[in-house]
Amino acid sequence: MTVCYVKLKHCNMIRGIKIWNSKGFTLEPYITSLQLVSNYTSAKAASNVQQLPRLPVPKLEDTLHKFFKTAQPFLNDEEYSNTSNLLEDFASVGGIGHKLQNLLEDRATKHQNWLEEWWLNTAYLGYRDPVVVFSSPGLVFPFRKFNSQTEQLQYAAKTLLAAFDYKSLIDNNEIPVEMMGKSPLDMSQYKKIFGTCRIPQPNRDKLSYNDSKYVTVIHNNHLFHLDLWGNDGKRLSVDQIVQGLIKIVAASPSPAKDAVGILTSENRDTWAKAYQLLSKDAENRRSLLDVERSAAVLCLDAPCGLWRTKEEDQRSLAAAHTIHGAGSNANGANRWFDKTIQFIVGADGITGLTYEHSPAEGQPIAILTDYIINYIDKNTVSEESSSSPIEPVQLKFTVTSEVSRMIDEAKYNLDKLVGDLELNCFQFGQYGKNFIKSQKLSPDSYLQMAMQYAFYRLHKTPGAHYESAATRMYVGGRTETIRSCSVESIEFAKTMLQEKATAKEKLNALKKAVSAHKDYTVMALQGFGVDRHLLGLKLIAVENGFEVPKLYSDPAYTRSAHMRISTSQVACKCDGFMCYGPLVDNGYATCYNPRNDDVNFATAAFRAHPDTSCEAYRQALESSLRDMHDLLLQNTQSKL
Ligand code: COA
């Protein structure tokens, strides 16, 4: 059987969904139920209060033309010619491409965003691998040094107050509308950050949206309900929240025997089964509902030896704790991975968050991060306090022997995943956006080309490369793929590696590659990329009972969509960074935060794959950035 994998995922990429077999293109039962069921889950579609335009359906010929160009680096002459014929056939008048295009255009007249519902369901809620590593990013805040547990709890209390301040700005529509040039961006993702929880279900999860004034606190793998408003309707002060946290810590002196939170790190169908078993008990049901309805989770983590760790490894350690909690014996069970936001405040100074990706992209979360860091660093003091704070309540679970076994398996599976994920997170301190801008180049495109160059110098082969571009200028817009690997990027990498190439040739190749990337970016931001349109054509084929066209099993498609470099710019002003796992077994993840004078990088690879090494990739990336800098500087100086 030939199995085709649509491999996208982080920041709206779908990973590993089986679609058809080679004989009759028979649909898997799973995908059938996933995509043919048209009733929505509890997902909130964006309302168009901002009067934003609708996501366009690009012209078929335009997409095919762009697609063919991006596939070129992955094809030999014979394959190139075969693909050319295949595309001609696909696009012929009366051919399957046109039929699908008409159906898609029809869908676009009936939905305010033709992709939104499909995307949520295929990229996230129907995706069955664990959210840990495979979907949920971590976000590391600048390190703190806590000299006592009280300092840790004070920091945690301030984080919660800052977050609730921010939540009230969101609730009152006071977050300034972000702009892309003159276009306002869809702000609906902000409304989905707090109070949202993913609920495991067989085949496809649901999202639950709630508005509440309490949080779930997890300490030593025990869960608690902590109200942030007292009985008098007044918000608690920092000291009052700290008092609540002290009680929680005292009530959970040792790790919970049955750490139910670790089940949320499981394969989604496995967790759905455990959830159903847990739900048979009335008290368990109340506890699950309590977590589901809380505004966010606060994880008070055990120490992890941060200050005994070599400085160069500290960022990677912090990334591990925010992505997966570093395993069942560390903080991996001190989590509820279904919750959209989990703040992490570790005993020895690792702070940050883990976020469940389905309701929102990284950028709103990064803006929330800056707000929190600012709030804490400016020592913002809320005058409010309550005369009648409410005692925290422990959320109890009764665990049957069957669920207990599932918890043991979840621990084993998480530890395996943790062992396989290699992380290398670092700050490139030589220069940042300012230098790149001074060279009249787009910082983002330049950094993307540095990654292309790094991959090529390491593997001597083109690396299909995913970058997310926000399509939030449209109602309900999320992302489009920027295909960063191009004819120009490969030419650039080759020229840089050629001993005989002159500085002028290298410079020209660099500028061409940056410019080609920028052009693609502009198209992607406007919804005129390749990947979402091709996905739409495939899904409309599935919905209407057509065979999935051969285009999707052609090497041009499978290779150019096997994203060996999966990247995202997530910009925050503070010295923080987002991090996540690679998209494919033999790939790298690279999330980056370009700041004025440095760039924070978080790279990841799977240890199990012999072809990849995060350490080697980091070195290649740093060397590439230095080479490019020297080349540009040499050019500037020669002009002087
Ligand atoms: N010369 C000088 N300056 C330039 C330049 C040039 N040739 N080209 C761009 N610049 C400037 C820009 O004006 C901008 O200036 P500012 O800092 O004053 O705003 C700055 O450099 C950065 O621009 P650039 O690097 O080109 O792109 P960008 O920051 O707009 O980022 C994307 C591009 C695609 C990353 C961004 O539009 C986007 O979509 N971000 C969201 C990605 C996402 O979804 N992430 C989360 C996934 S979970």
Image (cartoon, rainbow, N blue to C red):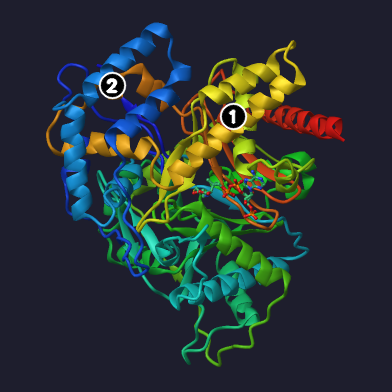
Q: How far apart are labels 1 and 2 at the CA level?
A: 26 Å
Percent across and percent down for residue 515 are 58, 35
Q: Is residue 222 left or right of residue 68?
A: right
Residue situated furthest front in the rendering: 639
Near-viewer residue (43 or 54): 54
What amino acid is found at the position of numbered circle 2 in the picture? Leu
Q: Quick one: quadrant of the N terminus?
A: top left
Q: Which residue is mark 1?
A: 513
What amino acid is found at the position of numbered circle 1 in the picture? Ala
User: Residue at the location (50% across, 50% down)?
Assistant: 333
Q: Is residue 169 left or right of residue 64?
A: right
Q: Quadrant of residue 238?
A: bottom right
The correct choice, above or below, for 311 with respect to 161 in the image is above
Q: Is residue 193 visible?
A: yes
Q: Quadrant of residue 536?
A: top left
Local SS, label 1 = helix
User: Residue at the location (29% across, 20% down)?
Assistant: 553
Q: Quick one: quadrant of the C terminus?
A: top right
Q: Residues within 10 Å of mark 1 (few under 14, many from 20)?
A: many
User: Residue at the location (45% across, 69% down)?
Assistant: 295
Residue situated furthest top in the rendering: 78
The correct choice, above or below, for 295 with respect to 636 in the image is below
Percent across and percent down for residue 218 are 52, 62
Near-viewer residue (491 or 612): 491
Percent across and percent down for residue 140 are 63, 52
User: Residue at the location (41% across, 54% down)?
Assistant: 338
Sooner in the amino-acid sequence: mark 1 or mark 2: 2
Q: Is residue 221 visible?
A: no
Q: Which residue is mark 2?
A: 87
Percent across and percent down for residue 535 are 30, 36
The correct choice, above or below, for 503 with respect to 117 in the image is above
